[in-house]
Each structure stands twice: as structure tokens, then as C-alpha cells.
Image: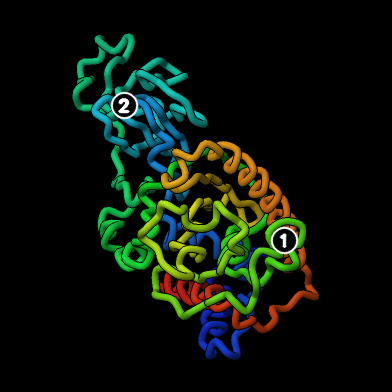
Amino acid sequence: MTTRQPQDAVEELAASVAVPFAQARAMPKSVYTSEAFLAREIDQIFRREWYCVGRASTLREPGDYIAFELAGQPLMAMRGEDGAIRCQSNVCLHRMSTLLEGRGNRRLITCPYHGWTYAADGRLRGAPAMSANQGFCREAYRLPQLRTEVWLGWLMVTLNPDAPSVAEHFRDVEEMIRPYGMENYTEWFNESFVWNTNWKILAENFMESYHLPVCHAGTIGGLSKLDEMICPPSPPHFNWHTILKDPSFRIACAHPSNTRMQGDLRRTTYLLALYPSLLITLTPGYFWYLSLHPKRVGEVHVTFGGGMSDDFLSDADAAGHFAALKTLLDKVNVEDKGCTERVYRGLCSELAAPGHLSHLERPNYDFATYLSRMTAA
């Protein structure tokens, strides 16, 4: 893979977004293939912005945890006995082993190396064979804590102590989708995987529905029409576009009991890209999401989850509808995996060159502008 200097990609990206959108092209290849540029993204984006761990409801019971990585830092999110969710370091304060893997439930956090144990709030509870060390004080040890917030049901964390609150940062998002009541959607599944593509390719794939009729011809391609898609200019910290779902796709439309929504809004889907990497498809009936974190230039870790509006929960056929939806989303993922991995293989070619954007790819241009601004700092 190329070892281009980050400034090469920074300058090429800045030049790419300096032209008006009507003349814009896809981002330069170096933005996807440069290891140095990825290091810049990690340092200047993922270390500074809010990152989504998933839905807070994933951690239902005291002791439920998720281990994850953010900007090279091993971290964990865990629900305490007091009901609060905390994100904290996943590294033992003794000889610095990582503590937890994957997800599960633990009454205590026990280091797999020397058996030091921590409570859910990170305070050291036990340290075998340490009484002979005169400088050791158990009360002085606590796993480093990170800023953690729950916003509209999303569990958010940041390494940046100076970042504005999530509610403040995404206030206009919350106002725009208020009739949906996203905080009242129940997650039905949550899983993770790694795809062989650059994280931005997968993000951009979500940000435009231009590819639906072709990439998703076997699934959802016929449920949305290109001429019904609205792709407006977006604010600096997120982008969005909308599509109208066919009324026959019942669980994508407002439930009959839903009196919050009127007219076309009852079948309007919002596709929200909250920078840097929380991607939400929000319909009046269900939602699904991706939360992305780069592993390497050609690998992205994906948290994938989804569920339904609580309006549907009391329906006798709710479980059947959601099972059918999950089957559909799994097929859509297979299609997206194929498309995004082919794009990455293609742009690594010496003969590849970025082409002009469609008017339906306005969110991609706004995303590129965000990346340029953040990496140029």
C-alpha cells in the first residue's frame, strides 16, 4: 500500500472540494489508500469527535459490557449497579493487560494476567499479594473514565474533554427528526464484523441512494425511486437525505396508531450520517444503523444493529414482521459488502480516476468537505 505523506492527500482533498458541487468529482484515491492520511484521521477526527458504541439498551442489566477500540485505545462500556453506563479504559493498572473481550456480563472486572479486580465503576476492589509493597494504596487506583452520554437512545463516547455535549452538537438533528421519536425505538439485534474496504467508502455508500436500483436490484432497489430522493446541502457536522418508501412496505411506514406524522412524512425515510461515522436509516416503523471505525486503510470494523418503533411492539405480528425485516437487511448487507469491497479494489488500481458526482451524491461532497476541514487543522 502507498506510503504517501499525509499532506499529499490533504492537499488533493482540499483541491477536490474547492470546486462548486455542480463540478465536483469523487474524492482523490490518496484519501482512501494513504496510511499516513488514515493516521491523521484517527488523530484529528476519531480522537476529537463523538463515537457511537451502539444503543444504550444493548447494555440492559448491571454488569453488561461491550469491549471496543477507539483511536487505538482499548475501552469498555459497562452498566453499573446504579444503572449508569460508563465508558472507561480496558487496560489493567498493574502490568497493563487488556481486561475484557467482546461482550457479556461480569459482576467484577478481573484481569486475566494477575487477577486484579475492578468494580463496574472502575474502582480497584482487589489486588492479590500486594500487601508487602509499602507504596501500594488500593483506593488510589481507578480505571480512567471517559466522557459518556446517552442521546436519543445512542451510547456516545469521546476522548476529547472539550467536545460540546452530544445534545448540543446534534441539536438540529434532533429537531429535524422529532416526529419520529427515535428514543422510543427498541433495538432487536446488534452484531459486528469487519469488511475489506476503506471506512469512508462504506460511509459514502450509505450517504447516497443513487446506487439502490443497481446494487440492490435483488432486494430494496424497486422500493425507492430516484426522482423522489431529496439530497439538500448539509450542515458542517452531519448530512442527510430522504427517500419515500412504497406504502406497501408496511413496517417502513407510520403505524395506524401514530398520530405524530401526517402526509408524506408517514412514509419518509431519513438517512442520517452523523460525523464521523454513525449512519442511521430511520423510517417511521423501523431503524437500522452502522457505526464505523477504521482498522487499516483497507479494513473497517462495523457495528450493525436495528429495531422497530415502539408503535409496532403491541402488534400480534410484530415479531414476524421484524424477522422478515432482519432477513431483508442481511441480504442488503451482502449486496453492500460486495459493492464497497469492489470499489476499494478498483480505486487501488493505477488506472483508476475519480469521476464527476451525480446530484444525488450531494451528501458525499459535504462529507468530503468535512474531512478536508478536519484533517487540514
Residue 257 appearing in the image: yes
Rendering coords of residue 266 (x, y %): 47, 63
**Could you say which disc has been placed on residue 162 in the image?**
none
Rendering coords of residue 236 (x, y %): 39, 74
Q: SS at mark 2?
A: loop
**Residue 23 vertical position relative to residue 86 in the rendered view, above or below:** below
Work out whether residue 72 or residue 85 is closer to the camera in this orientation and state it: 85
**Residue 3 vertical position relative to residue 94 in the rendered view, above or below:** below
Q: So how many labels did they put on this image?
A: 2
Tell me which amino acid carries mark 1: His
Quadrant of the rendered image containing residue 201: bottom right
Residue position for label 2: 120
Name the residue rendered at 57%, 62% in the picture: 203
Name the residue rendered at 78%, 72% in the picture: 350
Residue position for label 1: 216
Rendering coords of residue 205 (x, y %): 62, 64
Can you tell which of label 2 and label 1 is closer to the viewer? 1
Q: Which residue in the rendered view is the most extreme toward the front?
A: 256
Instruction: Say whether residue 324 is left or right of residue 119.
Output: right
Tell me which numbered mark, 2 or 1, is placed earlier along the sequence.
Answer: 2
Q: Quadrant of the C terminus?
A: bottom left
Name the residue rendered at 27%, 18% in the picture: 125
Question: Disc 2 and disc 1: Cα gap in Å?
Answer: 43 Å
Residue 271 appearing in the image: no
Work out whether residue 56 or residue 127 is closer to the camera in this orientation and state it: 56
Rendering coords of residue 84 (x, y %): 27, 34
Instruction: Say whether residue 134 is left or right of residue 232.
Output: left
Q: SS at mark 1?
A: loop
Quadrant of the rendered image containing residue 26: bottom right
Image coloring type:
rainbow
